[in-house]
Structures are given as structure tokens and as C-alpha cells.
Amino acid sequence: MWVWLHKFASPPHCYRLARTTRAVVRLERIRADRGCTLWRAGARTPDYQQGDAFRIIYVHAPSAWMSLCVYVVMALASAIGLIWRIKLAHAVAASCAPIGASFAFCSAGHGCPVGSADVGHLVGVGRTPDFGLILLFLYLGYIALRASIDDLQRADRASAVLALVGVVNVPIIHYSVVWWNTLHQPATVTKMAAPSISTSMLIPLLMMIVGFTLCFVALLLVRVRGEVLRRERSAGWIREAMA
Amino acid sequence: MAALLSSLLAADSLLKSDAQDGSLEQYVLSGQPLTWLLLAKIAAHWVLSGLPLVLISPLVAIALGVPGHALDVVVGSLLLGTLTLSLLGGIGAALTVGLRRGSLLLSLLVLPLAMPLLIFGSRAIELAIAAEPVAGPMYLLGALFVLAFTLAPLTAAAAVRISVD
């Protein structure tokens, strides 16, 4: 009954599955991104408060969202790997980290100009450029810990523990940073309550988030294939697959 | 005050990783519960590094011109903050104990986790200096300490087992 589930833990099966699903995901991602771009080009009027600066939101909010989402995926994969000792889950977690780090870098990168343009407040996320930076440090610590342990199994398990510690702390860090920033500036609190986002901006934003998520899935599938190849390089099935 | 806490962080990491080099395998092999051993280890480390800071903080605060009514908040927030930092440092040290460049990595691992402590600690002290109620940040610091106190020794024990075997 559970055979279909257990098959996902087998590297050869996953390797083949990743190859077939990747094409589908890539197609959908291109469709979502293009839809957003078209919509955005259609709504050419700049915002009356912020001019063209609000357009940063189409990149900033999805990348901030994805950097959190990738961390949760990474921690889930680490927990699965740690509890049921599934090697493939560790491979997934390892391939999540660089993707998440680049998303966090993106969100921290535009967070700084965004903070001055007050774009973040439109969706009520508050001023969180600092949070993107902290998340980036969490990812970098994970990658550095993994890289500095030579033995693969030990590296897997140690970094899995770190990912779990991190995911317990992520909501705490998030709220502490948000409270810190908003408590210091009473103006932002009133600003957050007043303007809610209009539909013409919300729909392309949601499409962009879908596009980013699919982009992450596509990248993850590619990286997992690479990781599986690297880890199983001496296995027989790879030689058969390559032949 | 935030600078004081962050300077503590650096000192924390170095002491911890040095202290754990030799006898760690004996702890694992001794048959005693590793969680309690590590908790004792962390407590001893806190007595050496955190407690003096807490004791000396009223003097430093007076030297920095903090008003008298804020002194108990300074001491209390530093007490909770240093305890939690020692516990977090324990996890980090346990993860990096077998590594050559451990101390640098350790500060990278612990710094993001210690961020809420710095924020709430400095917030409590600011409020106290302005003679406003400080219960909110102090409760949050206490909650963070309880969370770290219950989970950190377990996590550190798991990490030590991974690092040693």
C-alpha cells in the first residue's frame, strides 16, 4: 500500500521523476512570469504616492516570501532525513540552501532601497530589510557548517540539527525584528493601517509569487538531480542510466 | 548595552569551544545522560562568563549615566540575556566542536539566533530609561530563556553525539 510513497526515497526513482517533472514546471513558470509581466506593462500608471518605486514590490515581496518558504522546506527535509534516516531527504535539504540564500540575498538587497521608498508597507509586511539579512546569515551558516565537515553523513546530520534549531527561531526572529522596527517609528504603524493594496497591483503580485515558487521547484529539481549524481556516483544504476 | 551584549557573544564562543576539546568523548562514553552533563557544562560556563558581567553591569550603567530607577531592569535583562546566550552558544559549540575553523563558524551560527535577545534587551533598557513599563520585553526575554533552557541542552546533546561518533 505504501510502496508508492517509499519509492520517493529511492535515488534512481527520484532522479527519473525529477527529470520528467522539470519540463512541466519550467513551462508553467514561464507562463506565470510572462502573465505578470504583461499585466504589469498594461497597468503603466505609476503609484500616486511612490511613483515607479512601487514596482520593486514585484520582486521584493516574492523573494522575501520564497526565502522563508525555502527555509521551511529545508527544515522539513532535514527533519525527515534525521528521523527516518532517508539519504535523499538530506540531498534535498542540501540543495535547498543555496537557492534559499540567493532568494534571501535578493530580498535583503532590495530591502534597503525599499525601506526608504516605503514600499513594504503596502502589503503590510512592515519594514523587514534586516530580517532578510538575518535569514541570509542563517543560510550562510548552514552552508558553511555543511562545507566544513568532510564526512558526508556527519555533515548531513549536523546541518539538519542546525536547520531545525533555525526553524524554531525563524518566527521569533521575524517578529522581534518587525516589532523592533515598527515600535521605533510610530509613523509606519499608521501607514500600515491606511492603504491596502489595490486589485490591479495584487493580481500581478500573486502571479509573481506563483512564478517564483515554480522557479524554486524547477531549480530544486535540477539541483537535486546534481546532488543525487554526486552522492551516488559509484552506484550501479547511474552507469546504466548514463550508458 | 547592545554593544555589551554583542561583545559577550564573541567571548562566549571562544571560551566554549576551547573548553570542550578534551574530555567530550569521556562524557559521551560515561553512561550518564548527556543532556544533564551539557546543562551543567553550560551553567558552569555562564557562571564564569555571564555572571561577572551581570554583577558588574550596575557599575557600568551608572558610569554611562543610566538613571537609578532603571538599574534593576539593566541587571534583570542582562541576567536573562546572558543565560540564554550561554545556552545558544552551547548548541553552536556542540555543532562545531570537531572542526578546525570552529570559532569563526560558531559566531556565524549563533549571531542570527541571538538577534531577538539583543533587540528585546536593548528595548527593555530604553523603556526603563524613559521610565515606561518594561513588562513586555522582559516577559519576552523570559520566554526566550525558558524555551532555550528546555530545548537547548537536548539539541546540544544530539549535536555532540553527531560530532563525536
Image: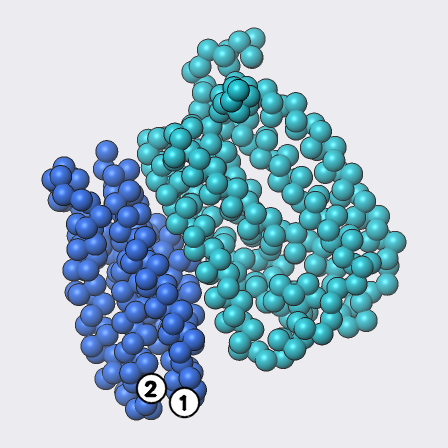
Chain colours: A cyan, B blue
- Which residue corresponds to mark 2? B70
Amino acid identity at mark 1: Ala
Residue at the location (59% across, 80% down)?
Answer: A186
Q: Residue A115, image x and y in percent? A: 62, 68
Q: Are marks 2 and 1 in one subunit? A: yes
Q: Residue B20, image x and y in percent? A: 18, 49
Q: Quadrant of residue A117?
A: bottom right
Q: Quadrant of residue A20?
A: top right
Amino acid identity at mark 2: Ala
Q: Residue B163, image x and y in percent? A: 27, 39
Alpha-carbon neighbours of circle 1 within 10 Å: few (<14), some, or many (≥20)? few
Q: Which mark is residue B131?
A: 1
Answer whether labels 2 and 1 touch (C-beta < 8 Å): yes
Residue at the location (17% across, 50% down)?
Answer: B37
B112 vs A209: above or below: below
**Does residue A190 appear to the left or right of A142 in the view shown?**
right
Q: Residue A87, image x and y in percent? A: 42, 28
The chain under label 2 reads B
Q: Which mark is residue B37?
A: none
Earlier-in-chain disc, 2 versus 1 = 2
Spatial CA distance of label 2 from label 1 is 8 Å
Q: Secondary structure at mark 1?
A: loop
Residue at the location (53% across, 76% down)?
Answer: A183
Residue B85: tell me if it is visible: no
Residue A108: tell me if it is visible: yes
Residue at the location (65% across, 77% down)?
Answer: A190
**Does residue A61 appear to the left or right of A32 in the view shown?**
left
